[in-house]
Amino acid sequence: MAGVQVGLKNLYYAVLTKDDATGVSYLAPVKIAGAINAKISPKSNTEVLYADDGPDETATALGEIDVEFEAKDISLTDQAALLGHSIVGGVMLKKATDVAPYVALGFMSKKSNGQYRYIWLTKGMFALPDQEYATGEDKPKFQTPKLKGTFVKRAYDDLWQRIADEDHPDFVAGIGANWFNSVEGTADTTPPTVTVVPANNATNVAVGSAVNWTFSEAILASQVSDSNFFLIKDSDGSAVAGTLSINTARTVVTFTPGANLSAATAYRAICTKDVCDLAGNRLAANSVTKFTTA
């Protein structure tokens, strides 16, 4: 069952240093202690084309994204970084000429099913906050800071948000473990490779054997299907009935035949090049492995 959001933790920001046609880059993410809440409000602009005395077509475009977050405290160092102020001798100086930088904002939110959602907003600017102070009373009253900002899509690639759910079938632990190391995540342009057991041209393979494809990195679990992984009899191309499974690390796919294979018979185990890693890199070519049973 998909969970609803019930928590918030690990609030980070990262200053955007480049965003143009040639690329995008950020400084290292910085954690803001004591996240309380975060609100994201995307706006869209819709136009309706009227023809023949009625609405005929609509077009929608993303507008700005209003963002507000509240924390237990926002240190002077973080305020200076987020709002463009300076700190001299331990004192934060606010000038009329200060310009807030573009930043990314990231956090994780626990869901009612116990799994987490991970979020990065990629480009936004925060405005000067309201300042409110109150005297102490006989009943404690917490005064927590809030920052409001406006986020937009990046110029480089139109990306405005990255989001990942732990309960998505293609999620692996490494995504969450590395989420706050960088806004972009680890760039991966290398196609996965695969090794197969039984090996190519193997002979005397036991008739009760399964086929294992082991990948050099995690693959998309959603692509583990009988159209991408299958075993056929070499003589006539007939498909062998069986079941597919993938391990929790998403690196090993197993085909288990529904019954023992025929003795002294040649088979081909096929994995198509449509299989790809978590970054979308596909296998360089179809993997075709021939073996003969004992």
Image (cartoon, helix red, strand yellow):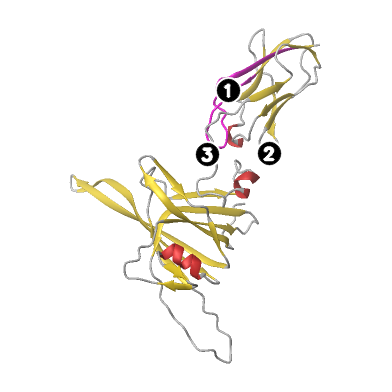
**Mark 3, residue position:** 187
Mark 1 to mark 3: distance in Å?
Answer: 24 Å
Q: Are marks 1 and 3 in contact (CB under 8 Å)?
A: no
For the residue labelled by badge 2, is the local secondary structure a helix, a strand or a loop? Answer: loop
Q: Where is residue 167 drawn, in percent x and y?
A: 62, 48
User: Gap in Å between the C-alphas at discs 2 and 1?
Assistant: 20 Å
Q: Is residue 149 left or right of residue 208?
A: left
Give the labeled residue for mark 2: 249
Circle nearer the N terminus (2, 1): 2
Q: What residue lies at 58% left-to-right and 22% top-to-bottom? A: 272
Could one spot residue 166 in this view of the protein?
no
Which range of residues does the magenta coloring cover? 270-292
Pointer 1 residue: 272
Front position in the image: 104 or 141: 104
Pick the front one: 9 or 213: 9
Q: Nearer the viewer, residue 60 or 127?
A: 127
Instruction: Indicate which label's residue lies in the foreground, 3 or 2.
Output: 3
Q: Quadrant of the C terminus?
A: top right
Q: Is residue 213 above or below residue 119?
A: above
Give the x, y percent position of residue 119.
52, 53
Residue placed at 76% from the left, 16% from the top? 261
Residue ranking furthest to the front = 89
Q: Earlier in the sequence, mark 1 or mark 3?
A: 3
